[in-house]
Image (cartoon, rainbow, N blue to C red):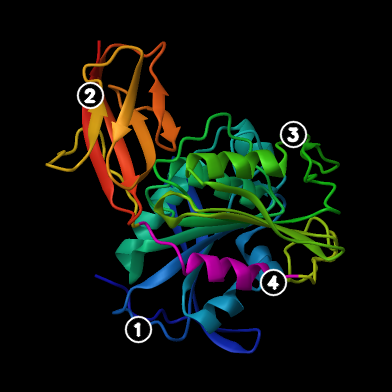
């Protein structure tokens, strides 16, 4: 049964908002989070959900104040949840984003499992539109949003990392994931050109362009590095004409630093950029994307869909044929993604013999599937 409006009513930034602090037990630990419901929430009409993750040394409460995302949720009519990372013995909360950061990474905390279980819990407790679940985060939380895009793309419709990079060795999302990122050229903790920053966490940061180009390539974008603005205020670059109508866009400001663009200052970190509002721009992008390009597993029913793989059986290569196909993914006999990208000749060198699944997306976003045998 869906929960009715919780009894806890809090005032935040001049608007009446409904908060529900809660705990779930995941991976042998009690994990905490706070749900913010807009005053328009009735419990009967499903609403979009934004998962907002704090940075290292932060908390859900701290990010709520820094980002002011709850104010945007009230204005726009969506639910926002602020989960907490696991605290170290010193009380420092972090997320295990792969190659970052701190206690959570060192202890191999299953934060993907936590967010997955959290989504199950929230969907059971509240009226949530499961096609419109999004993730964002500041710094370490932004790194975590990238990891969710890689590993929970079947649930996360789009992401909006703020002052973050990606530290996943292998990222193979099951569908094209739209990305909007925010960064400052003045950020020395996570330098936009990559490398080790001057923050407390001594890890390597992938260059912004490398990360975004990888997501664009996976989505089969055909218009690359389209510079929409480049001046003394900011640089805006977009990758578009992608499969499933996905897109990748980045805002890089000349002001601010390692902070939430358009948010509140924290008193100890860099001043926030005033050039853009991350909240406004991410919500604008989120509204344009849903999970309408979810794909089926290798054991799913295929059906009579207009998709051909030639030659079949195959040896050295295949071509996927079908009208309007914009994006292709190949899964090996145990369900691992071994190829993802635009249509064309696909090299099978080094691939084991067996039954493979091809999943293709057309211009209308519809998934098509076919099987072939590699001998």
Q: Which residue is mark 1?
A: 42
Between 104 and 335, the one lying in front of the other is: 335
Q: Earlier in the sequence, mark 1 or mark 4?
A: 1
Using the rendered view, name the quadrant where residue 245 is placed.
bottom left
Q: Does the stretch in magenta take in 284? A: yes
Question: How far apart in space, not on screen, are marks 3 and 1 (Cα)?
Answer: 44 Å
Instruction: Locate residue 48, reporting x and y percent.
Output: 42, 69
Whether residues under marks 2 and 1 lie with C-beta atoms below 8 angstroms apart, the answer is: no
Whether residues under marks 3 and 1 lie with C-beta atoms below 8 angstroms apart, the answer is: no
Between 112 and 220, the one lying in front of the other is: 220
Q: Which mark is residue 372?
A: 2
Question: How far apart in space, not on screen, are marks 2 and 3 (Cα)?
Answer: 42 Å
Image depth: mark 4 or mark 2 in front: 2
Q: Which mark is residue 277?
A: 4
Q: Which residue is mark 3?
A: 203
Residue 98 vs 49, above or below: the answer is above
Q: How many marks?
A: 4
Observer able to see residue 220 = yes
Between 92 and 96, the one lying in front of the other is: 96
Q: Residue at x 39, y 56 (%)?
A: 119
Between 158 and 367, the one lying in front of the other is: 367
């Amino acid at each position: 049964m869906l929960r009715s409006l919780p009894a806890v009513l809090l005032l935040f930034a001049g608007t009446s908002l409904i908060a529900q602090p809660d705990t779930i037990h995941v991976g042998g630990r009690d994990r905490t989070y706070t749900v913010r419901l807009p005053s328009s929430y009735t419990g009967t009409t499903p609403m979009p959900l934004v998962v907002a993750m704090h940075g290292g040394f932060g908390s859900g409460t701290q990010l709520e104040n820094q980002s002011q995302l709850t104010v945007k949720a009230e204005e726009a009519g969506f639910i926002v949840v602020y989960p907490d990372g696991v605290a170290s013995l010193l009380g420092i909360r972090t997320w295990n984003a792969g190659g970052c950061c701190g206690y959570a990474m060192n202890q191999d905390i299953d934060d993907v499992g936590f967010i997955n279980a959290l989504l199950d819990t929230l969907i059971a407790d509240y009226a949530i539109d499961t096609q419109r679940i999004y993730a964002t985060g500041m710094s370490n939380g932004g790194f975590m949003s990238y990891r969710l895009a890689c590993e929970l793309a079947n649930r996360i419709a789009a992401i909006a990392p703020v002052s973050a990079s990606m530290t996943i060795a292998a990222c193979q999302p099951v569908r094209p994931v739209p990305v909007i990122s925010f960064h400052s050229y003045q950020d020395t903790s996570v330098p936009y050109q990559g490398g080790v920053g001057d923050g407390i966490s001594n890890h390597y940061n992938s260059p912004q362009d490398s990360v975004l180009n990888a997501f664009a390539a996976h989505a089969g974008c055909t218009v690359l590095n389209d510079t929409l603005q480049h001046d003394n205020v900011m640089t805006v670059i977009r990758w578009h004409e992608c499969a499933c109508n996905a897109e990748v866009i980045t805002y890089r400001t000349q002001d601010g630093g390692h902070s939430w663009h358009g948010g509140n200052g924290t008193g100890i970190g860099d001043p926030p950029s005033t050039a853009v509002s991350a909240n406004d721009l991410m919500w604008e992008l989120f509204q344009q994307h849903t999970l309408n390009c979810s794909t089926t597993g290798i054991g799913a029913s295929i059906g009579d869909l207009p998709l051909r793989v030639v030659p079949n059986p195959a040896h050295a290569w295949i071509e996927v044929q079908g009208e309007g196909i914009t994006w292709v993914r190949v899964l090996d006999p145990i369900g691992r993604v071994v190829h993802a990208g635009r249509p064309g000749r696909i090299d099978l060198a080094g691939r084991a013999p067996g039954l493979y699944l091809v999943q293709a997306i057309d211009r209308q976003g519809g998934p098509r599937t076919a099987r072939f045998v590699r001998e």
